[in-house]
Amino acid sequence: MPRIKNNSKVIDLRLIIRQMEKKFLDFFPGYLFLLRRFSFHLFSELTSLLLPHIKNGKILDIGTGHGTVPVELAKRASGILVVVGLDISENLLKRARQLAKSEGVDGKACFVRSDAHSLSFPACVFDYIVSTGSLNLWESPVEVLNEAYRVLKPGGRFWLLDQCRVKSIRELSGALFRRRFFGIGLTAYSVEEISGFIRKSRFGNCNLKIEDMIVCIELVK
């Protein structure tokens, strides 16, 4: 974890890096499309993981970025009524809408601008929620988790896939070369931090799996 000491106080540099990364992604949305080309297998892997569990209903994708997950779900899951991709960046949402249109699913995948910490939806409207690669950018994960709990229907599921903080060079090399996961975890939370956020949230507990730097979490309301 990158930290510096200032007058005997420890400053977590991840907060600063997180803000810089948000601004960078907002001004240069094409960067995520470049990553999409090289890490599409991870989005396809997540979609394949979700499909057996998704029967019908509405899905929310928190931190949708370039919109790959909503587009893939809209293409491959026949029972889905609508997939809503949510992001704070309007520049990224424009790219996501273009992708949905080019893939012929713009009537099934839609995109809205909203802050994940304060979702612009009423309670109990989504059957499923997913989030890929946005946890490491959340300033208050407990708030986001509680908002996800609020808009999720009783019995609904929330799948969260993200990077966690690397603990060794072996983990980093495994992520980069074996899983082809392009990230070095500068802003990532540790597994212990993530577990703590979940315990403090309304979800309370979860099923958590980790491989190399990739953590997969399943939450049930």
Image (cartoon, helix red, strand yellow):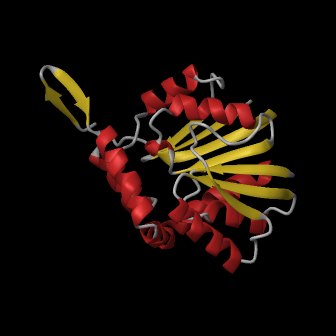
Camera-side residue of 201 and 174: 201
Q: Is residue 73 visible?
A: no
Quarter of the image containing the N terminus? top left
Q: Quadrant of residue 79?
A: bottom right
Q: Is residue 92 above or below residue 114?
A: below
Above-or-below relation of 163 to 28:
above
Residue 103 horizontal/vertical position (percent)? 70, 77
In the rendered view, would you say 209 is above or below 89?
above
**Number of numbered labels in the structure image:** 0
Residue 91 image point, x, y percent: 51, 65
Please identify the residue farthest to the bottom as the structure is shown.
Answer: 102
Q: Is residue 201 visible?
A: yes
Q: Is residue 24 left or right of residue 57?
A: left
Residue 83 in picture, x, y percent from top left: 75, 57
**As rendered, which of 90 and 137 lies closer to the eye?**
90
Image-based side of 195 in relation to 171, left or right: right
- State the residue at coordinates (49%, 71%): 33
